Amino acid sequence: MHLILLGAPGAGKGTQGALLAERLGIPKLATGDILREAVRNGTELGREAKQFMDAGELVPDHVILGLVRELLASPAAEQGVIFDGFPRTIAQAEALETILGDLGRGVDAVVLIDVPDRTIVQRMSGRRTDPETGEVYHIVSNPPPPEIAPRVIQRVDDREDTVQRRLDVYRQSTAPLIGFYERAGLPIERVDGTQEIERVQAEISRRLAR
Ligand code: AMP
């Protein structure tokens, strides 16, 4: 099963993707997580990506596609993957078709997690990350445990002005993927992402089982 999770930054793709990955027994491929780890480790990929990420801009397609091509060819991805934060442009979606096609596979489903912009801004401004593990918390809805609280930080790209930019980039470059997949004949499963985590998960599962 190759499943794409679409939705604005902060819509809950990471949370829902992790739950789905566990339930379906296939890995989650989150390009943002991979890039952040590369930045933390100071690798060449990290150095190349950091400036774009900090500004809320997209990392160039050739960088992302090299990464995805490599990961999809690995044995861990043989039974399929859940894509979180990829594809983010039409060019990436077209390249994904080719990469999967060469492997004799294809996209099976697209889930759109819908959350209004003002909720996104509220969510993201309260988001805090543990710099040691990359674990994400929220000061109100999911506070870090006391032993971790002193070291959590706000990601540069979770600051309000950068969040606004990321939302603009989403509208401009990523939202057109909805039409792209509709035209390709894949139904878009729209899910209300403002509900509780478990309800969103249940709704996604129900849609996928149809
Ligand atoms: P995310 O955690 O998915 O919101 O990603 C954080 C940042 O990583 C984004 O704002 C982009 O700068 C970069 N990024 C992640 N995935 C992609 C992608 N598929 N294409 C381009 N840039 C990406």
Image (cartoon, helix red, strand yellow):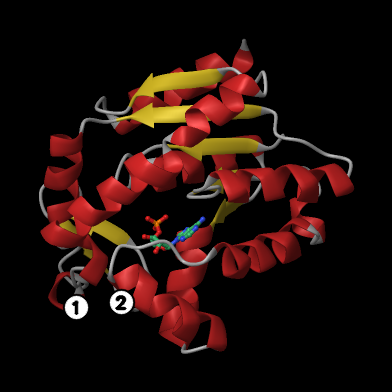
Residues 180 and 71: in front is 180
Residues 167 and 132: in front is 167
Secondary structure under the numbered disc 2 in the rendered image: loop
Circle 2 residues within 10 Å: few <14, some 14–19, many ≥20: some
Q: Are marks 1 and 2 in contact (CB under 8 Å)?
A: yes
Sequence-first tag of 1 and 2: 2
Residue 151 is marked as: 1
Q: What is the three-letter code of the residue carrying label 2?
A: Pro
Q: Where residue 58 appears, x then y in whole percent?
A: 42, 61
Q: What is the three-letter code of the residue carrying label 1?
A: Arg
Total number of numbered discs in the rendering? 2
Q: CA distance from mark 1 to mark 2?
A: 7 Å
Residue 131 is marked as: 2
Give the left or right position of residue 48, taking residue 124 as reference: right
Secondary structure under the numbered disc 1 in the rendered image: helix
Q: What residue lies at 12% left-to-right and 57% top-to-bottom?
A: 160
